[in-house]
Amino acid sequence: MAIPVIDFSKVNGTGEERAKTMAQIANGCEEWGFFQLMNHGIPEELLERVKKVCSEYFKLEREETFKNSTAAKTLSYLAGKKNGEKLENVDWEDVITLLDNNEWPSKTPGFKEIMTEYRAELKKMAEKVMEVMDENLGLPKGYIKKAFNDGEGDGAFFGTKVSHYPPCPHPELVNGLRAHTDAGGVILLFQDDEVGGLQILKDGQWIDVQPMKNTIVINTGDQIEVLSNGRYKSTWHRVLATPDGNRRSIASFYNPSLKATVAPAPALVVKDDEKINQTYPKFLFGDYMSVYAEQKFLPKEPRFQAATAM
């Protein structure tokens, strides 16, 4: 079983071909929570530059630091005990987050220029993906973007996580990244096209998200689940540590503004015999993030309730 791979260029077409592609994306959102987009409009040469500059950045600025990290030292200690004890609360991951207004790596030539260009392209793509979701859910064009921006304007959060999962000497004792669902809205992942490790939970079993060259993996976060009143689900996923290969992962998150109120779209709240079937509560996204910070690796349903109570 493999996650759906969809030709995104066909949403620009007409007629039956476009309808079929829209249906494939709807199925990806409803049944999987993860799907891969090819022919997505991000220039291939830009993606090649991103791969190259991120690998150079890791070698130049992070590799030595990771060897002395808590994860590396603790894993070495546990492996030495030879009793099978696992490293539970740390991930085998080196990660930084890029925002428009935080400090970026400065020693790697071209990093800032290339990643700024990449983020601009990905943000446009995120908004296009959200418009497809609007249409598939029967919502007005721009509904999700407006909800996430807390009305008009540009208040939504757009962050990019640059992660590396270096070769792990004891992959059986540690997670690359522990299983979780994503807190936010729409996630666009440019993953390594050679080294695997990302898996999603589907019908009770873990399935690999197959590496493919220059596709963008889309997944839906918890806020899309709320906004769609459960039509689209956020999916549990994890990264396995692997003994060989340094897996690169560049995930961009289009999330609501912390001030935005997130609630099911009224059009998706079904009224049966005057009884309103609203499965999901309404809350401030900032409150949800406070809960998520403490409970990221725990079930999501109590998080929805806890955020509502704040």
Image (spheres, grey):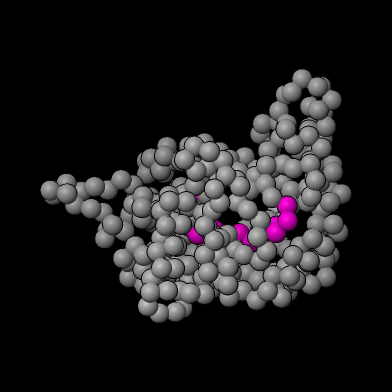
Q: Is residue 213 left or right of residue 263?
A: right
Picture layout, residue 82 above or below residue 19: above
Task: Give me the residue at 48% from left, 74% from top.
Answer: 10
Q: Quadrant of residue 279?
A: top left
In-front residue for pair 260/192 = 192
Q: Quadrant of residue 5?
A: bottom right
Q: Quadrant of residue 179?
A: top right
In the rendered image, the quadrant that contains the C terminus is top left
Task: Give me the residue at 60% from left, 63% from top.
Answer: 216
Residue 187 within the magenta-colored segment of the rendering: yes
Measured as percent of width and height from the top left, residue 177 is found at 65, 43
Measured as percent of width and height from the top left, residue 276 is found at 20, 48
Q: Which residue is farthest top?
A: 83
Can residue 12 be seen by looking at this rendering? yes
Measured as percent of width and height from the top left, residue 6 is found at 52, 65
Can residue 184 be seen by looking at this rendering? no
Q: Bounds of the magenta span?
A: 183-195
Q: Is residue 275 left or right of residue 135?
A: left
